[in-house]
Image (spheres, helix red, strand yellow):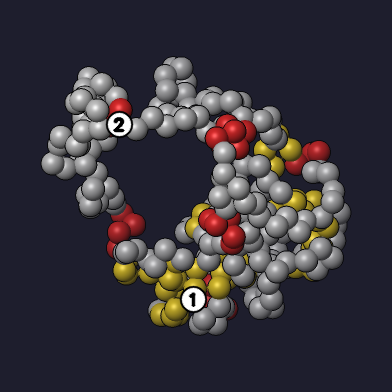
Amino acid sequence: MTAVDYSLTRARPWKSLLVKLPERAGRNSQGRVTMRHQGGGVKRMYRLIDFKQFKLGVPARVEALEYDPYRTAFIARIIYRDGERSYILAPKDLRAGQEIIAKDDAPLSIGNRCALRNIPIGYFVHNVELHRGRGGQMARGAGAYAEVLAQDNGVTHLKLSSGEIRKVSWDNFASLGQVSNEDHSLVVIGKAGRNRHKGIRPTVRGSVMNPRDHPYGGGEGRSQRGTRRPKTKWGKITGGRKTRSRKKRSNVFIVKRRK
């Protein structure tokens, strides 16, 4: 069992920025399970994250770096010069006491937020807007980043950590740096109870089910799959099949698909 080195500030979460979300255990509004293997887990409060950072030109100071139970990345609590506080995604190497700012032509330092057209080629960015004013939607998970590859005729070419190359309007805003907690993918869970604390219930293999419950089920002892192509519990073919819609509008912005 391994864990991440939490070099965070010893501070309690800011109460006015906390919200209690209802626990649905993978069920929809009709009470039917639409997402399997969810339920239980420790109680937790949701932190209201400011993905937009609309207070342009107002400097802010990083008060604390905190853990967020609802996301893989760490978060930073900032206080603006006018006294307002908010949470933002904490980039790698951000420190408590550091001053950051969001504006169109902000200085090129970790944590600042500015328009993509003002970011030189080779820089890492995160929390990237896909539509101006809607807030960051891309590169928000632990260790995620987008590398600026080119600036061309009103469009910025970004290479994501998955390998995908995507075109985004250079008027959109992005935060400088890579998202914190890049070692998250290396964590070894180690025991079943740790997943239960996270609200993840056990997953049963299809090969040990009955034939009526899964295409892989049935047979005497440890038997072969019995079906030529890999399938889901509901008989949908999976292995190698592309699930992205060919008619999706945003396909024109993808220069190169991820591997």
User: SS class of the residue under badge 2?
Assistant: helix
Provide the secondary structure element on which disc 1 rests: strand
The amino acid on which the numbered mark 2 sits, given as a three-letter code, is Gly
The spot of residue 87 in percent (x, y) is 72, 51
Q: Nearer the viewer, residue 144 or 103?
A: 144
Give the number of marks. Answer: 2
Q: Quadrant of the C terminus?
A: bottom left
Residue 155 visible, this orientation: no
- Asked whether, in this view, residue 136 is left or right of residue 93, the answer is left
Q: Which mark is residue 206?
A: 2
The residue lying at 83 percent from left, 44 percent from top is 12
**Rendering quarter of residue 47:** top right
Disc 2: CA contacts within 10 A as few (<14), some (14-19) or many (>=20):
some
Q: Residues within 10 Å of mark 1 (few under 14, many from 20)?
A: many
Q: Nearer the viewer, residue 225 or 230?
A: 225
State which quadrant residue 20 falls in: top right
Tell me if 73 is positioned left or right of 38 in this view.
right
Q: Residue at x 59, y 60 (%)?
A: 183
Q: Is residue 8 left or right of residue 116?
A: right
Above or below: residue 14 compared with residue 154: above
Q: Does residue 88 lie above or below 194 as drawn?
A: below
Residue 232 appears in the picture as rendered: yes
**Mark 1–mark 2 CB contact (< 8 Å):** no
Task: Report how far apart the C-alphas of labels 1 and 2 lie in the structure.
Answer: 43 Å
Which residue is under mark 1?
148
Residue closest to the eye, 232 or 133 = 232
Tell me the amino acid under the disc marked 1. Answer: Val
Residue extending farthest left: 228
Q: Is residue 80 left or right of residue 123?
A: right
Report x, y in % for residue 49: 66, 48
